[in-house]
Amino acid sequence: MLNVGRLRVLRELHHRKTLSAVAEALSYSTSAVSQQVRQLEKEVGVRLIEPVGRRIRLTPQGLLLADHAEKILGLVERAQVDVAASLEHPRGTVRLAAFQSAALTFVPRALRELQDRYPDLIVEFHQGEPERTLPALSSGDFDLVIAESYPGIPLPSMPGVVVDTLLEDGLWLAMNASIADSIDPACDTFAQLSGAGWAVEVAASAPRTWVVDECRKHGFEPRIVCSSEDLAVQLQFVEAGLAVAVLPGLALEAASTSLRKFPTAPGIQRRRVLLVSREASYSLPASSVVRTALERASAQLRVGELGR
C-alpha cells in the first residue's frame, strides 16, 4: 500500500524541483527526503525521478503518480475538514500570507477580531508577495493567501483553488508637490511624466509589468530610479521628490498630506485584492471564520474612498 507521507514528498518534489527545497519545506533532512523517494520507487517498482543538472525532474511515471498524489492528499485534507466541521468552535492553526499594504491596513483588524472571538484559533501570519505566496499555497505551506490582480493581468491559472474578491483598490499616480505643480490635469498625465524618475516594484512582478506597460502605451520607457517591493520605500522616494510612482489606495493610507495624486486614467483604474484558498480546505471552519473576518475588516476601509 502506498504511504501518504511519501506521496506528499513526491508532490513537493514536483512543485519545488530540488531535494533541499523539499527538505526545508517538510522539516526533513535532505537524506531523509531521498530515502523516502527511494522507498516509494520500491513500492511502485519504477523510477520516479531523474536528475536534470542540479535539479530533479519527475519521470513520466513520477508525474502520473504525483497527479494521483494531489488527489489523494486533497481527500485527506477534506477528511480533516469534515472532522473539524463536527466541532462546536473553530480551532487549530490557519496560515495566512499577504502582501505589505494589506498587512499594514486591514489584516491586523481582522486578526484582532479573531483573537477576541475564537481563543482556540491560532492564525500564523506571513508577509510575502503573490509571486512567492501563491505557489506556496498550492504546495500546502499556507491555507489562505491575500493576492492582487492588476487590470489586464489576471492571476496565473491555479487548479484546485478558490478566489474571492475582498476589495477593489484605486491606482494613483503619486508625486510630491513640486512635480505635481508642473502637471496640467486637462492633458495626458502619464505622458507629462516621461522625464521623471520612477519607483516601481521588483522585476517580473505584476505591478511593475503593469506600470511599464502603461508608460509604453503613453510613448515612453520609464527611467527607473527605485526598485522595491516595499511600497513604503517607494512612498519615501515619492515624498522626497526623487521619483513618481503608481501606488494603490491602501499604500497611500500612511502618506503625508503634502503628497499629490492623479488618476491613472480618466476613469479610475483599480487593482483587485483577492483572497485565495485551497478548494479542499475552503469549508474548514477555521478557514471560514478567518475569511469572514478579512472580508469584514476590508469592508470597513470604506473602499470607495480608496479610489477618490
Image (cartoon, rainbow, N blue to C red):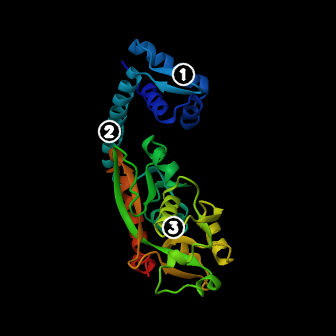
Q: Can residue 164 be seen in this view?
A: yes
Q: Where is residue 192 in the image (x, y as percent from the top left)?
A: 55, 78
Q: How crowded is mark 1: few (under 14 residues within 10 Å), some or many (20 or more)?
A: few
Residue type at the position of mark 1: Pro
Residue 79: image tag? 2
Q: Distance between the residues labelled 3 and 1?
A: 43 Å
Q: In this view, does 249 lie to the left or right of 275?
A: right
Q: In this view, does 221 lie above or below 185?
A: above
Q: How far apart are marks 2 and 3 (CA)?
A: 50 Å
Q: Nearer the viewer, residue 132 or 7?
A: 132
Q: Which of 5 and 112 is in front in this view?
A: 5
Residue type at the position of mark 2: Ala
Q: Name the residue under label 3.
A: 215
Name the residue at the front extreme: 219
Residue type at the position of mark 3: Cys
- Please identify the quarter of the rendering in which residue 34 is found: top right
Q: Position of residue 102 (x, y in %)?
A: 50, 65
Q: How far apart are marks 1 and 2 (CA)?
A: 35 Å
Q: Which residue is drawn at 43% across and 78% down?
A: 307
Sequence-first disc among 3 and 1: 1
Q: Mark 1 points at which residue?
A: 51
